[in-house]
Amino acid sequence: MSTSRVFVARLAGCAVFDPAGDRVGRVRDVLVVYRRTESPRVVGLIVEVPGRRRVFLSIGRVTSMASGQVITTGLINLRRFEQRGGEVRVLAELVGRKVTLSGSNGGPAIIEDVAITESGPGEWAVDQLFVRKPRTVPTPFTKGQTVFVRWIDVVEDVSDEPQSAEQLVAAYNDLLPADLATSLLELPESRRLEVAEELSDDRLADALEEMPESDQVLLLSRLDDERAADVLDQMEPDDAADLIAQLPATRGEALLDLMEPEEASDVRFLLSYDADTAGGLMTTEPIIVSADSTVAEGLALIRRHELAPAIGAAICVTLPPYESPTGRFLGMVHFQRMLRYPPHERLGTILDQSVEPVTPETSAAEVSRRLASYDLVSLPVVDETHRLVGVVTIDDVLDYLLPDDWRSADTDAPAPMAIRRRGAVAARKAAHGSA
């Protein structure tokens, strides 16, 4: 086994491979237990396997931790990880903890990283701590001194909370939204709120969109109205509408009044439709251009980093105005079609007019059938005067069709299909009315 010292913050996110070289998951945290007279002993890794399930990998089954990857014996118990008494997650609970240093470096400090080292075959223990001391001269542009210390040279502040929300946010910085949502849900409720308060509005919005509705409501209910409205502003309008529909009517209206007028208008518009219709599933923010726009302009629009893949798969061409509800809908141009034409070609000349738009009242079942029948990623939605009001994308339909607990399912067996969000229909109509 490699004897290199490993820093846990760098280990997080590393791929885990079996002896044949097949990737079985990614490291999400390191689990340790305290000992009376020695530094904490590593008992295993918390690994995320396909399906976003967190499982426990015993440190004895790790044969190598080096070069940004972990090699195992190939035997992983796929039972969902459950933390036991006495066990401590390094990233979630130890990093960010306040300590007091002894010796020449004495004084308060905060743990920013933890180094673990192999002490014998299949035995790893905490070796050093990377800590930051307070600033000697408080200024907004300087940070305190950082030093490496041994575990035996620190005393933990037992009165302090077990982790720093600021440090956790830094540890979660590179996580995808779905992984960030999972990590947040694994924290105790009070700690989850602290971390949520430290996250930026757009980052928290991304995580909320990946959570089950009950957890969305619980977290949003703990935020003050102004912060909650700011986060809703950053969410996709259809996701924000689904979330507001689950809130008590008075709070939902209060949040809509605090949101940016343009964003609130989109959400109110979506709230006027039943959740099991195209209008209830659609997003009101597709890419919309004029017929005179060129292929080069279209490709530039779909290259935007913040754009969801399903939205970027096609461009809608309409008459002015170019925000929903638009002028008359003319057709769509899929990105593959744009790649077949020169950059100066006008999009109006290469429209795919074979895709029949649906109306906001079209059932979700019919939308699903059309997407599947014609191998489409999105469908345009038009009103009675053929104005574009939005598009329904494949990810919205999947989210609608999957069972409520699909994000936390413990089994890989196919779950029975269930229609989601039916409970929101009455709330949308009764509490919010039509746009």
Image: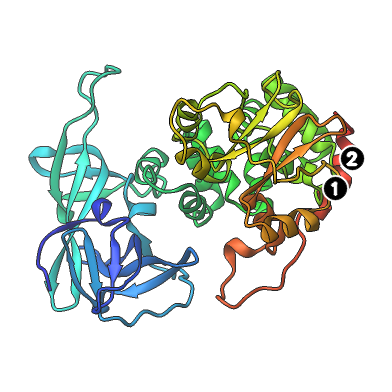
Residues marked 2 and 1 touching at CB (< 8 Å)? yes
- Residue depicted at 49% across the width and 54% down the height: 187
- Residue depicted at 17% across the width and 31% down the height: 145
Name the element at disc 2: helix
Disc 1 packing (10 Å; few <14; some 14–19; many ≥20):
many
Q: CA distance from mark 2 to mark 1?
A: 6 Å
Residue 134 is situated, as x and y percent measured from the top left of the image, at 24, 30
Q: How is the image coloured?
A: rainbow
Give the position of the C terminus as an image quadrant. top right
Residue 29 is situated, as x and y percent measured from the top left of the image, at 34, 59
Task: Choose between 321 and 198: the one closer to the eye.
Answer: 321
Q: In the figure, is residue 90 to the left or right of 68?
A: right
**Residue underneath mark 2:** 429
At label 2, the amino acid type is: Lys
Task: Choose between 386 and 243: the one closer to the eye.
Answer: 386
Task: Choose between 4 and 203: the one closer to the eye.
Answer: 203
Name the element at disc 1: helix
At label 1, the amino acid type is: Val
Give the position of the N terminus as an image quadrant. bottom left
Instruction: Inspect this view and state whether residue 214 appears.
Output: yes
Quadrant in the picture for residue 230: top right
**Residue underneath mark 1:** 425
Residue 50 is situated, as x and y percent measured from the top left of the image, at 45, 67
